[in-house]
Image (tube, coloured by chain):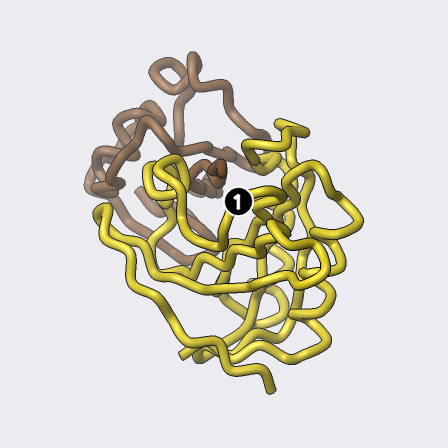
Amino acid sequence: MNLTVNGKPATIGEETAVSITHLLEALQVEQREYVTVELNGDIMDRGDFEKATVKDGDSVEFLYFMGGGR
Amino acid sequence: MLKIPREILDAVIAQAQVGFPLEVCGILGGTANRVASRYPMTNTDASNEHFMMDPKEQFAVVKAMRAAGEEMLVIYHSHPESPARPSQEDIRLALTPNVFHLIVSLENREQPVAKAFRIAGGVIEPVEINTV
């Protein structure tokens, strides 16, 4: 499956659509609990990571939370 | 070493002063450890003790930097009433790899202090700021 991930072409082995959770695992994204995901321009709710599917040709962006405190 | 144009560092400090007593935050973009642009961000916590960036703004800034041929170099925020050193929360939430963390302290509002760090795996490394 060919995707665009953070603006760059990426290929994962799966031929069929996968969940966002599966994609983050396949991309070996660390500390996934702190990641925000945008799929084809839409920011995804964390609760939808298991059921939202990523398919060939999709564009995925992910970022880590950016925060802190004194 | 982190190179920051004087006018951009001054703008970061001014943002911290205008936003006082709340923490302010933002992102600096550039290449080869040299800052070229500043992106002030909303502190969604609107707090004197915490900051959290708006994911929608984060994605927009990342795309703008990409379009400009820049990379995310610095995540910055202010400490309105504490020193310019990473707090435990700063360390815990330093999740984005390969960026510098710039902290502006207004502990003495007449004499703001800006310091930069690398934070990885809970380890803090001070980084020299070279204003250019």
- Locate residue A25, reporting x and y percent: 22, 33
| Picture quadrant of residue A20 | top left
Which one is in front, B38 or A20?
B38
Residue at the farthest bottom position: B132
Question: Can residue A32 be spotted in the picture?
Answer: yes
Relative side of A45 to B122, left or right: right
Q: Position of residue A52 (x, y in %)?
A: 42, 19
Q: Which residue is located at x 35 percent, y 47 percent? A: A2
Name which residue lies at 34% across and 66% down.
Answer: B126
Q: Which chain is yellow?
A: B
Quadrant containing the C terminus of chain B in the rendered view: bottom right
B14, above or below B34, in the image: above
Taking depth in this image into account, of A8 and B107 the one nearest to the observer is B107
Quick one: which chain is brown?
A
Name the amino acid, label 1.
Ser
Q: Residue at x 40, y 23 (%)?
A: A53
- Between B85 and B77, the one lying in front of the other is B85
Question: How many neighbours does mark 1 have within 10 angstroms: few (below 14), some (14-19), or many (20 or more)?
Answer: some
The residue at the point 24 percent across, 46 percent down is B122
Q: Is residue B98 left or right of residue A30?
A: right
